[in-house]
Image (spheres, rainbow, N blue to C red):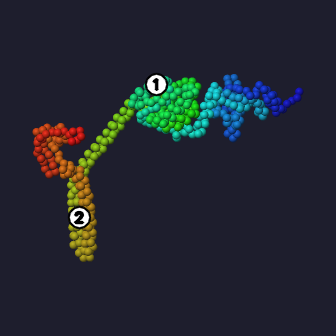
């Protein structure tokens, strides 16, 4: 019996597999495992497995470039390829030419191709997304007038803020005519420019029921809208091309109304809190202003401004006497020096006193400006009732009662002839 080498054995096995027509151009399904992307060559190497077996798979760069998704471990796929024997390692491999996610077929592939196309054009860029208005007055709704989504949006919006106006821009949301109608409704809303924000969508359904929102014409109309658009298509698990093109995606139509319409009661409470905060700050400022005159009056220099200068004058006289006495004791030789020193000292002291007197005058002028007597000097008067209480309004006195008026230079004893309140216009 002839003895074969391992190389020949593998070559013969490979030849048999190549000749096996039933193993060429086959379709199969399995779960991806041990996926590796060879960066330098661009080829993909992974395994496909099911509950009972596993086989190695190779997909070269040219075929891999046509796959519209990124493979990953655990993803179930359908593939098309041919079985070959890799002689060097002695193992059977499947060389795949096509691959798509299992159970989604052409619908999913069309979705992914359109998404990648529009994304490459920059239609979904985050920097192009617009913020929703905080306080919309008019909300436009692009949906079917007979669908459940419209009722959900109206119910939630009315509960949150009945003052927000809702405007329906009707359009079919299912069927062959739906994409063109939705795009036309969005364009009409943009030209109208009466809405502050738009909600576009429909209720849940099968993937084919949502197909209108996976079309290029609707995606471009959403991106071209002059008004911010909220996408509200189907249930939370449903994802459409419109979601990527919109400024914001809502998981459901009801959630869209929650996001768009502010709650009136929450706004009222916020305004109330801001009013209390403003009032507290104003009261603090007023209290600080009212304490300012008292702080000025508490200063000893302002209450008795001449005390400081008098003390300095006495010190100056004392020093002058000492210098004079010293000069008398040392009449010879040092009289001129002492006289010059005394003159310089006196000049310095007088300058110091003059500066202090100027500061005192400035502070006294400020205190005088804060004094109520300064107000009286401008022609105003203070009115007191017969009990000595200050009168701040006409409601505190009656006709015939005696009052005293304090003026700048004296007091007037008067009697009230009549009491008249100002009209609303102040006359």
Which of the pair 268/71 is nearer the observer? 268
Q: Nearer the viewer, residue 77 or 415?
A: 415
Whether 74 is drawn above or below 386: the answer is above
Residue nearest the observer in this picture, 168 or 231: 168
- At which x and y percent is residue 166? 43, 30
Report the residue at 46% width, 36% height from top.
193
- C-alpha distance separating marks 2 and 1: 95 Å
One can see residue 56 in this view: no
Q: Secondary structure at mark 2?
A: helix
Residue 408 lies, with reference to residue 386, above or below; the image says below
Residue at 49% across, 23% down: 146
Local SS, label 1: helix
Quadrant the C terminus occupies: top left
Residue 333 visible: yes
Q: Which residue corresponds to mark 1?
A: 151
Residue drawn at point x = 71 percent, y = 26 percent = 27
Give the mark nearest the N terminus, 2 or 1: 1
148 on left or right of 380 = right
Q: Residues within 10 Å of mark 2 (few under 14, many from 20)?
A: some
Marks 2, 1: nearer the viewer: 1
Packing grade of label 1 (10 A; few <14, some 14-19, many >=20) is some
Q: Which residue is mark 2?
A: 316
Residue 335 location, x and y as percent? Answer: 25, 74
Name the residue furthest right. Answer: 1
* Up-down relation of residue 268 to residue 52 (above or below): below
Q: Quadrant of residue 28?
A: top right
x, y (%) of residue 14?
80, 30
Q: Is residue 131 left or right of residue 427?
A: right
The quarter of the picture where the N terminus appears is top right
Residue at 38%, 33% (x, y): give it.
267
Q: Position of residue 373 (x, y in %)?
A: 19, 50
């Amino acid at each position: 019996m002839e003895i074969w080498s391992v190389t020949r054995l593998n070559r013969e096995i490979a030849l048999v597999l190549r000749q096996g027509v039933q193993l060429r151009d086959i379709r199969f399904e399995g779960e991806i495992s041990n996926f590796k992307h060879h960066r330098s060559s661009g080829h993909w190497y992974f395994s496909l497995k099911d509950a009972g077996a596993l086989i190695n798979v190779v997909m070269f760069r040219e075929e891999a470039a046509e796959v519209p998704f990124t493979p990953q471990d655990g993803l179930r796929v359908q593939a098309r390829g041919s079985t070959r024997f890799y002689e060097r390692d002695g193992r059977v491999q499947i060389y795949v030419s096509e691959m798509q996610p299992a159970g989604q077929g052409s619908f999913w592939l069309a979705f992914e191709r359109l998404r990648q196309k529009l994304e490459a054009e920059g239609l979904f860029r985050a920097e192009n997304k617009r913020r929703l208005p905080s306080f919309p007055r008019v909300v436009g709704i692009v949906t079917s007038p007979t669908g459940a989504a419209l009722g959900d949006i109206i119910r939630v919006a009315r509960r949150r803020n009945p003052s927000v106006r809702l405007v329906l821009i009707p359009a079919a949301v299912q069927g062959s005519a739906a994409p063109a109608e939705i795009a036309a409704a969005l364009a009409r809303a943009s030209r109208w420019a009466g809405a502050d924000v738009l909600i576009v969508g429909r209720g849940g359904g099968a993937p084919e029921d949502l197909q209108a929102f996976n079309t290029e014409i609707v995606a471009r109309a959403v991106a071209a809208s002059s008004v911010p658009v909220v996408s509200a298509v189907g249930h939370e698990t449903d994802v459409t091309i419109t979601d990527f093109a919109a400024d914001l995606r809502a998981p459901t139509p009801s959630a869209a109304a929650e996001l768009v319409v502010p709650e009136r009661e929450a706004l009222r409470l916020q305004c109330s809190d801001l009013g209390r905060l403003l009032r507290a700050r104003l009261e603090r400022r007023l209290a600080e202003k009212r304490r300012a005159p008292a702080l000025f009056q508490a200063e000893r220099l302002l209450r008795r401004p001449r005390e400081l200068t008098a003390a300095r004058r006495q010190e100056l006289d004392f020093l002058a006497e000492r210098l004079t006495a010293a000069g008398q004791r040392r009449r010879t030789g040092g009289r001129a020096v002492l006289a010059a020193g005394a003159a310089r000292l006196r000049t310095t002291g007088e300058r110091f006193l003059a500066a202090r007197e100027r500061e005192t005058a400035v502070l006294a002028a400020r205190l005088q400006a804060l004094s109520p007597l300064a107000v009286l000097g401008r022609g105003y008067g203070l009115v007191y009732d017969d009990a000595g209480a200050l009168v701040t309004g006409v409601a505190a006195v009656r006709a015939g009662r005696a009052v005293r008026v304090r003026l700048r230079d004296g007091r007037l004893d008067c009697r009230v002839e009549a009491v008249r309140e100002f009209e609303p216009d102040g006359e």
